[in-house]
Amino acid sequence: MNIALRDQRKFAARASWYYYKTGMTQGEIAKRLGINRARVINILNEARKDGTVTFHISGEDSEMMDLEVQLKEKWDLRDVFLTPGVSNEELKNDLSMAGAQYLEMNLPSEESLIALGWGETISGITRNLGRVIPEKTSFVTLCGGVMHYLSEHTPANVGTPLSGFLYPFHVIPTPLMVGSPELRDQLLNEPEVQHVMNMAQLADIAMVGIGSLMPSTEFEDFGYKSQKELDRLKKHGAVGEMHGEYFNAVGEPLELEHHHRLISIRLETLRKMKHVVGVAGGSDKVEALRAALKGGFIHSLITDEVTARALLF
């Protein structure tokens, strides 16, 4: 089955599950999936004809959507959106694609402001967005250093709109972490930096990654290049991070020296934003995700099926 057909079947299964299992109306399904009611009717009719719907919704999608409901209830989340379990090599791209699909289905208005965090998975969302996003949608970064990822795939310069990207993109024109607290404070006082950071806090939806304490190339951008330095973080109780700010197993931000050198929207602020969607998965992220959920840093979650099952216990 080709990718387009597989995605079409998954879309039909999701609409059918909402209609036949949860009792949502066709209008509610249309709003949830970001389509019109007429298309919902067509999808449901085709689902009955092609066998997607019989006595039950066929395939693994029904189980996965049941899992979404369980996870949503356990952690009191606004939304849960799952991808099937895949290999680690495919996971980041699948999560990026899921993040893009979630945005396409859940933008609150024709002029939504979307905030993006730091990391490969989040930056991958921009490369997977289709043209169904309203043209008046705009994007903003939640921290410095984002162009480190975006520039690998675009010829854009820091602080300028992304070349080839269809929507306005407002970038915090700094690194994620600088050499001293004094330099951080100086940059935060720059009008351009203040403007973008203030804008980020007003985002309708923020898409953020969650990092673990497993060694990775991403840690090098924080200056943590050895297992010894990672062990030191663990001794402080760190289990995960968002935008370079670490938290412990119960979701409390830690007091660490390098936090005073970060240029980012802080965890305490994320808690208060309109809608923060965590996008992360894999066995190495379970502990960090559980702590982020306990801390209330994210309001919705996009992850894989295997990680979701681990988060139920």
Image: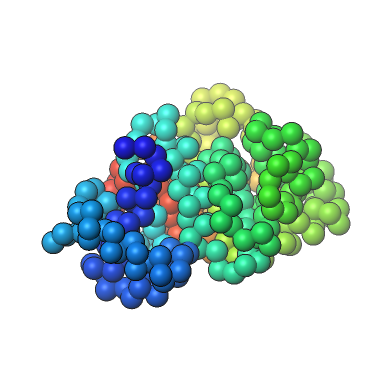
Image quadrant where residue 77 sits: bottom left
Viewer-proximal residue among 108 and 181: 108
Residue 286 on image: x %, y %: 38, 44
Image quadrant where residue 71 sits: bottom left
Q: Is residue 77 above or below residue 286?
A: below
Residue 195 on image: x %, y %: 79, 59
Residue 58 on image: x %, y %: 20, 52
111 to the left or right of 296: right
- Assign the N terminus to one quadrant of the image: top left
189 to the left or right of 92: right
Q: Residue 196: in sight, yes or no?
A: yes
Residue found at x 57% / y 61%: 205
Residue found at x 56% / y 27%: 217
Residue found at x 56% / y 37%: 120
Structure colour scheme: rainbow
Q: Is residue 95 above or below residue 298?
A: above
Q: Residue 74: in sight, yes or no?
A: no
Residue 283 on image: x %, y %: 36, 37
